[in-house]
């Protein structure tokens, strides 16, 4: 069995070797074949008919090259020339065959238009050499033919001629030769000019529309996209040779530098545009940092276009563009999953353009063979790409406008509801004030009657005194509650500042405990130091807050169980202050309300059977926070409940710094 597998593997390897050899032979045969200019076709592609010699020093003369060619040192090329960014000068050789009766006048078009220097030498059968020079470093007016690419008029005699082409370039070393009959060339140029006009007109329209979009919506993405489209347009204008032909005919160096500068700047705007569209800063920060690095490389490339180092930076930027296709892969997948039309259009546009861009970039780097299709694919593909992107941005703007209208409607409704709520609050406060004043009069009558009865009563037994004290305590508590109720609007109005005065904390605590009534007085034990720091606060508001905390402890703890109150100086966040610790026994506060117990209308366990509206703790926290302090529920430990409250003091207290402790 093992022997059979080895034999099968051996056969497969032999077949692959034979196929590889045949491919080499076919390529060699195709590469060594001459260009047949019989006139039956209006144009003849030079692809597959070239041989190359690399001249690293760039000092070889034509005679030396002829000798090198005779020695067989030229290497056939199976396709077009694509060497990437190389400092070498190259020599190309093509054999031309013109049969009897074929037209002798031809045009040799050499693409692309950004090659720095070209020298053409034609060696016909009669041995008389003909030469011509071109390149984008020469003024456009020096060209024999006014055309965006390099065009050499040729008079080719019948028989076999040999053509040498010397090429030097700081840009990508890409050479695509094509032979034309003049009439066929003129026909092709007329159609080409119309297509180029449509292309650049479309780019101008997209740029203009997005500038209008920016002026209307004030969203930076429209400005970034306009910069991206316009810079790509200028870059292609330079690649096509139109910048040198129409804008800078007498400044070839500037036109050449603009090619590299617009590539770098276009990369910056392109990277940042897609980073905004794909929301990289917020959702994919690592990818956003990588894209920022690539954008910086684009800036360096743009600057290098005006220095001798452009050939070093340009290939790095092209490799970064290829790498960006991988960086954007995950964000694009996430965008596609959004399922909305604009997100999918953006993902589709980028995926489509990425495929064309990959073909163009790999050809420029010499990783794949350059063809005329690879040169124009990014040109034509960008039209579709920009059209889809523009549609997606239009949809996004439409959705943003729709969301804006919805938000305005919601805001209008909120204003109306807020206005109604303010009116209701005003009416409620008026009613509360009225009720408070109406109740305060009979309370005053009860208080006066209680005091009169105490004076006139001759029975001074402890039970009778206890009864009078209970009535007096209830009246005092009711007065405090009514006093707070009549001033409640000041409590909830953010613009109202508490009336701060120095407060005797020990006296305030004693009053608050007394307001609990006899049962509360027996159960509450207050511990404090011999001296307490002064606190600047609104006494009425602070009394209500402390009374709420004490009253809660009485309500929600077992009957006759002790309630421990500790008042002591404590530091918080580097500030001196006074801390209240109120601890009582009781059932654990449910986990689901631990974080919301200080919110409006939230009450503790209903099992306690205590009446209330759920506003006590909300107002307590509000009072402490209005005074620059806080109140919080400590973690329930050992079956006890602990509330901590803290207020800043008016002066810094000496002594060691203490942190808020846990309940014992």
Image (cartoon, grey):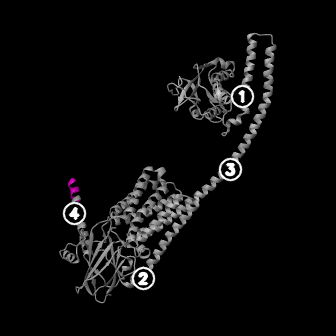
Residue 663 position in % (x across, y down): 54, 24
Identify the mark at residue 14; answer none if there is no mark. Answer: 4
Q: Is residue 605 visible?
A: no
Residue nearest the observer in this picture, 592 or 643: 643
Disc 1 to disc 3: CB gap under 8 Å: no
Disc 3: which residue = 413
Residue 190 position in % (x across, y down): 44, 80
Question: Which one is in front in this view, the residue at disc 2 or the one at disc 4?
Answer: 2
The extreme bottom residue here reads 101
Disc 2: which residue = 187
Whether residue 466 appears in magenta in the rendering, the answer is no
**Lateral position of residue 152 relative to residue 480, left or right:** left
Identify the mark at residue 258; answer none if there is no mark. Answer: none
The earlier-in-sequence mark between 2 and 4 is 4
Whether residue 5 appears in magenta in the rendering, the answer is yes
Q: Residues within 10 Å of mark 3 (few under 14, many from 20)?
A: few
Q: Compared with residue 192, is residue 611 higher up or lower down, i.e. above or below?
A: above
- Distance from Cα at disc 4 to Cα at disc 3: 81 Å
Q: Secondary structure at mark 4?
A: helix
Start and end of the magenta stretch?
Answer: 1-8
């Amino acid at each position: 069995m093992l022997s059979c597998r080895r034999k099968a593997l051996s056969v497969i390897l032999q077949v692959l070797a034979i196929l590889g050899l045949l491919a080499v032979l076919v390529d060699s045969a195709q590469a060594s074949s001459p260009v047949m200019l019989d006139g039956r076709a209006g144009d003849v592609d030079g692809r597959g008919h070239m041989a190359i010699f690399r001249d690293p020093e760039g000092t070889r003369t034509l005679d030396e090259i002829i000798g090198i060619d005779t020695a067989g040192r030229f290497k056939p090329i199976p396709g077009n020339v694509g060497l990437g960014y190389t400092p070498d000068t190259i020599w190309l050789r093509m054999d031309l065959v013109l049969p009897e009766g074929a037209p002798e006048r031809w045009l040799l078009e050499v693409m692309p238009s950004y090659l720095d220097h070209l020298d053409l030498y034609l060696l016909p059968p009669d041995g008389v050499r003909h030469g011509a020079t071109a390149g984008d470093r020469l003024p456009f007016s020096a060209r024999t033919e006014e055309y965006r690419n390099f065009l050499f008029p040729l008079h080719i005699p019948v028989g076999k001629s040999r053509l040498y082409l010397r090429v030097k370039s700081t840009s990508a070393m890409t050479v695509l030769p094509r032979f034309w009959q003049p009439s066929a060339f003129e026909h092709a140029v007329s159609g080409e000019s119309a297509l180029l006009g449509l292309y650049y007109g479309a780019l101008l329209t997209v740029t203009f529309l997005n500038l209008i979009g920016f002026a209307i919506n004030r969203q930076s993405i429209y400005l970034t996209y306009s910069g991206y489209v316009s810079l790509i347009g200028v870059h292609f204008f330079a690649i096509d040779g139109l910048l040198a032909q129409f804008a800078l005919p007498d400044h070839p160096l500037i036109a050449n530098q603009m090619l590299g500068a617009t590539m770098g700047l276009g990369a910056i705007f392109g990277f940042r545009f897609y980073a905004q569209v794909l929301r990289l800063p917020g959702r994919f920060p690592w990818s956003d940092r990588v894209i920022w690095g690539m954008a910086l490389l684009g800036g360096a490339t743009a600057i290098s276009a005006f220095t001798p180092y452009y050939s070093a930076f340009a290939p790095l930027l092209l490799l970064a563009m290829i790498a960006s296709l991988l960086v954007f892969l995950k964000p694009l997948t996430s965008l596609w999953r959004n399922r909305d039309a604009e997100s999918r259009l953006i993902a589709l546009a980028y995926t489509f353009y990425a495929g064309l861009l990959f073909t163009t970039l790999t050809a420029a780097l010499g990783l794949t063979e350059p063809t005329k299709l690879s040169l124009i694919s990014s040109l034509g593909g960008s039209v579709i790409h920009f059209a889809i992107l523009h549609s997606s941005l239009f949809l996004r703007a439409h959705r943003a406008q729709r969301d804006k209208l919805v938000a305005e409607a919601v805001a209008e409704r909120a204003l109306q509801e807020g206005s109604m709520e303010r009116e209701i609050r005003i009416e409620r406060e008026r009613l509360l004030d009225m009720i408070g004043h109406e109740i305060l009069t009979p309370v005053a009558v009860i208080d006066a009657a209680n005091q009169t009865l105490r004076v006139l009563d001759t029975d001074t037994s402890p039970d009778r005194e206890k009864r009078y004290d209970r009535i007096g305590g209830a009246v005092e508590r009711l007065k405090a509650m009514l006093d707070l109720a009549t001033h409640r609007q000041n409590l909830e109005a953010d613009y109202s500042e508490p009336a701060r005065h120095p407060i005797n904390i020990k006296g305030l605590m004693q009053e608050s405990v007394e307001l609990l009534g006899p049962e509360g007085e027996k159960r509450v034990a207050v511990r404090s130091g011999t001296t307490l720091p002064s606190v600047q606060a609104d006494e009425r508001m602070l009394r209500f807050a402390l009374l709420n905390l004490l009253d809660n402890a009485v309500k929600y703890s077992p009957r006759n169980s002790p309630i421990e109150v500790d008042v002591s100086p404590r530091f918080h966040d580097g500030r001196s202050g006074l801390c209240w610790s109120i601890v009582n026994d009781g059932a654990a506060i449910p986990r689901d309300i631990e974080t919301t117990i200080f919110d409006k209308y939230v009450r503790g366990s209903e099992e306690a059977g205590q009446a209330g509206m759920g506003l006590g703790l909300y107002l307590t926290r509000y009072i402490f926070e209005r005074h620059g302090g806080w109140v919080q529920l400590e973690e329930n430990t050992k079956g006890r409940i602990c509330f901590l409250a803290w207020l800043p003091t008016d002066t810094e207290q000496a002594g060691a710094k203490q942190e808020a402790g846990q309940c014992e």
